[in-house]
Amino acid sequence: MGKLEVKGRDVVIPGEELATGMDYLPSRGTYRDGEKIVASQLGLVMMEGKVVKIIPLSGRYAPKRGDTVIGKVVDVAMSAWRIEINCAYSAMMSLAEATSSYIQRGADLTRFYDIGDFIVANVTNVTSQKLVDVSMKGPGLRKLEGGLFIEVKSNKVPRIIGKQGSMVTMIKEATNCRITVGQNGIVWIAGEPKMETIAIGAIKKIEKESHVSGLTENIKTYLDKELKGVKK
């Protein structure tokens, strides 16, 4: 019979034994060594049924297919845009993936997205040579207008979003801000200036205290305190 050697949200180090027996299954940040599941990186233990995984406490964003990211246009080529996505590699967005509109050959692509524009895009491919392709075809994918941007550690994004979006939804509803969280650690916030400041404070608090139990209640208390006396 399998045995769990750690508890959910325990901080573990590489090489630490997490579980024994075949009842438990290794996932991200872990590996199987015989009948043992062992940590391969520093991070927080997370349990999903019998699946053991680790949420890393450090490390730069590594793009994966299916990620939703916030990127900045840094170059406009003849038939594509180069997008900075907060990692060691920039991404490319082709004409076919940029818009559903017909774009005539030789058209001025800056009419659609110019250098300095920010977009919400989806990672569609990452090659072994670390070439990254992104697309803006899909629900919620768009050019971002106005607002402001902050950067958080990409490994803290799941905590900022929360289960089924619960954490970021709480911040949105409390501050009446529009918020988009990219899995690459870039967050866009748009609202009244005072509300933007409160939303930023809440997000930074989550980033700092992501390992603390009772985080949802802590953030709710923080929002209630900051909003007290502030007219929306």
Image (cartoon, grey):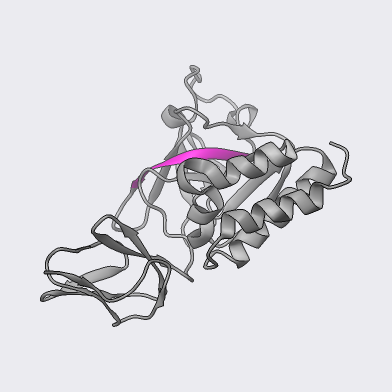
Q: Position of residue 96 (x, y in %)?
A: 42, 28
Q: Check the image and report above or below for 119 versus 106.
A: below
Q: Position of residue 31 (x, y in %)?
A: 22, 70
Q: Residue at x 49, y 30 (%)?
A: 98
Q: Where is residue 55 in the image (x, y as percent from the top left)?
A: 41, 64
Q: Quadrant of residue 25?
A: bottom left
Front-most of residues 74 and 122: 122
In this rendering, would 115 be left or right of 6? Answer: right
Instruction: Point out the image quarter for the N terminus.
Output: bottom left
Q: Is residue 229 magenta?
A: no
Instruction: Point out the image quarter for the C terminus.
Output: top right
Q: Residue at x 48, y 61 (%)?
A: 155
Front-most of residues 126 and 45: 45
The magenta segment is: 118-125
Q: Which residue is drawn at 27% across and 55% down?
A: 49
Q: Does the magenta stretch include residue 120?
A: yes
- Number of numbered discs present? 0
Q: Residue at x 52, y 68 (%)?
A: 211
